[in-house]
Amino acid sequence: MDVSNILASHAEKYQSITVEKETPLEVDAGLLLATDLNPIEEETYNENLEDHLQNLARDGVQSLISSLFSLPSKPSPDGPLAILPPPVYQLPRAKPLPKPKPPTKWEKFAAAKGIQHKVRDKKVWDEEKQNWVNRWGRHGKNREIEEQWIHEVPTNADIDYDPRKTARDSRKERVAKNEKKHQQNAAHDIDRTLAVTRTSTASMGKFDKRLEGEKKLRGIKRKFDPNEGSIEQEKNSSLALLAKMDSDKRKMRTGPRAEEGDVNVRKAVRFASKGKGGLA
């Protein structure tokens, strides 16, 4: 039985993993990019375009996969992962770099005082066990005194003194204190947000509907002049405005003023009339 044809078709179907070309393909594993710089074969291109494109794609993918298998790898739940190197080509950004956000008041204060934000690790080193243990939670470092099998009892302790219970009560007291602090901070933030929303209206919250149990806002003056008043009040306010405008105009003068004798008459009149010298 002649099986040469079957072997030939099988070999053609599963081509070799090596890609032989006149100009080797340039592979940038960091970007998963393969570049073929060889000129297009016009004959195969015109004869069967679809097969020609498939062969070019196959060569590029094969070269890229071969380069990935030569890279170092690391294990993962889904299997080994290749560690990609830094990319060679510098691709242009589609959008400009985002502008850095200005520092907040707390960040400025921390920078001026040299305060650094430190994140506490979840694991701590246990000298007795010579191993890393959890800082909190079950079998955590904060429960070490509660779970140890031997305790030192003070000489003046009561008969019913329980060191494990004392340590547990102390830990629960610290937890309750931290939770109370957290609730106070949250309530303070809510009150501050509510105060901002109250004063954002035209009446500064005077005619807004109040919530049940809402505290009265402090430090906010809600004094509104009536839209309609007496003619005398309107006259006085207009004269006061004109006097202020005239006073500001005189302050803007830069040239020397003519004085009458040794007394500044203008200044004396303005002082005696409380800024209403023009009316006098």
Image (cartoon, rainbow, N blue to C red):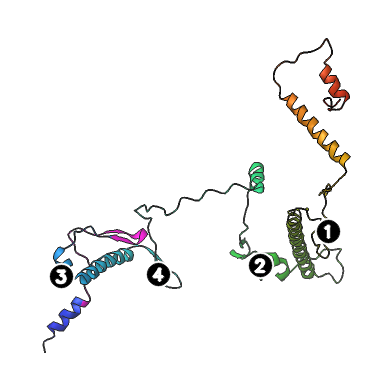
Question: Is residue 32 rendered to the left or right of residue 10?
Answer: right
Q: Is disc 1 surrounded by few (<14), some (14 to 19) or many (20+) residues within 10 Å? A: few
Residue 132 in percent (x, y) is at 59, 64
Q: Given the image, on which type of amino acid does mark 1 rest?
A: Lys
- Give the extent of the magenta segment: 13-34
Question: Is residue 194 rendered to the left or right of residue 10?
Answer: right
Q: Is disc 2 surrounded by few (<14), some (14 to 19) or many (20+) residues within 10 Å? A: some
Which one is earlier in the sequence, the residue at label 2 or at label 1?
A: 2
Q: Given the image, on which type of amino acid does mark 4 rest?
A: Pro
Q: CA distance from mark 2 to mark 4?
A: 33 Å
The residue that label 4 is drawn on is 80
Residue 219 in percent (x, y) is at 82, 48
Question: Would you place residue 4 above or below residue 120 in this image?
Answer: below
Which one is in front in this view, the residue at disc 4 or the one at disc 3?
3
For residue 215, which numbered disc appears in the image?
Answer: 1
Q: CA distance from mark 1 to mark 4?
A: 61 Å
Residue 182 in percent (x, y) is at 74, 61
Name the quadrant of the C terminus: top right
For residue 47, which numbered disc appears in the image?
Answer: 3
Q: Quadrant of residue 15?
A: bottom left
Say if the magenta span includes residue 31: yes
Which one is earlier in the sequence, the residue at label 4 or at label 3?
A: 3
SS of the residue under disc 3: helix
Q: Given the image, on which type of amino acid does mark 2 rest?
A: Gly
Query: Is 185 or 224 nearer to us in this picture?
Result: 224
Disc 4 and disc 3 in contact, CB within 8 angstroms: no
Question: Would you place residue 256 above or below residue 32 in this image?
Answer: above
